[in-house]
Image: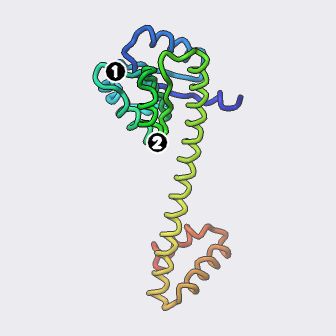
Amino acid sequence: MELKIRQYSVLVVSAQPKFNESLAAMINERTYYEHTTEQSVASAKRLISDQAFDMVIINAPLPDEDGVRFAVDRSVGKCSVLLLVRNEYYPEIFNRVCPYGVYTLPKPPARQLVLQAFDWLESSCERLRKLEKHSVSLEDKMAEIRLVNRAKWLLISRDGLTEEEAHHRIEKLAMDRCLPKREIAEWIINTGE
C-alpha cells in the first residue's frame, strides 16, 4: 500500500503500564510508526509544545485529568486523535467529542478494533495533510490577488487608468514577458513603472 511509505509520529498518553506494553507491541508492528509514551496530560502538553505528532492516542482517565479536554484540544490542529474510555462512559463521552472529530473506543478494545483504529487515524492524517496543502495554496492565491490589486491601484492612481485597463495592462505585460502576473505586479510596485 502506497501510504505505508510515509512515517507517522504517534503520542500515546496513558498511565497504565500493561496497556502501554500491549499498545506498543501493536504500534511496533507498523514499522512506519514512531511512538512516544507519556503518563499524564501535563507531560504530554510539554512534549507537544516542542514536537508535532500526527496521531495522539489517549487512554482515559489519566492521573491529572480525564483526557477529554486534551483530546478535543489536540483535534483542532492537524492531528488525528483516538480516545479510549471506560465502556460505561462511552456513549456520553462519544457525544461530547464526536463533533470535534475525535475517534472514540470503549475499553477494553479488541486487538482487531485497535488495528482498524490505526487505519482510521492514518486516513484522517492523510485527509488533514491534503486540507493543509489546499489551505496553503489558497493563501498563496489570495496573496497574489492582493498583490495584483495593489499594482492595479497604483496604475489607476498614477496613470489615470480604469480598473479594467489596469488589469489588462498587467495581463499584457505578463504575457509579453512570459512571467506570472505576481512578478509583474511586484515589478510595478517596486519600480513604480
- Say which residue label 2 marks: 99
Q: Are marks 1 and 2 in contact (CB under 8 Å)?
A: no
Identified at 44% across, 33% down, the residue is 52
- Say which residue label 1 marks: 62
Spot occupied by residue 143 in the image (x, y as percentages of width and height): 49, 63
Numbered disc in front, either 1 or 2? 2
Are there few (<14), some (14-19), or many (20+) residues within 10 Å of tag 1?
Answer: some
Q: Is residue 104 above or below residue 154?
A: above
Tell me the amino acid under the disc marked 1. Leu
Mark 1 element type: loop
Identified at 56% across, 31% down, the residue is 121
Is 96 on the left or on the right of 129, as rendered?
left
Identified at 37% across, 20% down, the residue is 38
Identified at 28% across, 23% down, the residue is 64
Of 134 and 176, which appears nearest the observer? 134
> In this rendering, does residue 75 appear at all?
yes
Spot occupied by residue 103 in the image (x, y as percentages of width and height): 50, 32
Q: Is residue 27 above or below residue 67?
A: above
Q: How many marks?
A: 2
Is 16 on the left or on the right of 181, as rendered?
left
Q: Quadrant of the N terminus?
A: top right
Tell me the amino acid under the disc marked 2. Pro
Q: Earlier in the sequence, mark 1 or mark 2?
A: 1
Spot occupied by residue 178 in the image (x, y as percentages of width and height): 67, 69
Spot occupied by residue 11 in the image (x, y as percentages of width and height): 44, 25
**Marks 1 and 2, Cα distance to the nearest angstrom?**
22 Å
Residue sitting farthest toward the right: 1
Picture quadrant where residue 97 is located:
top left
Mark 2 element type: helix
Is 131 on the left or on the right of 154, as rendered?
right
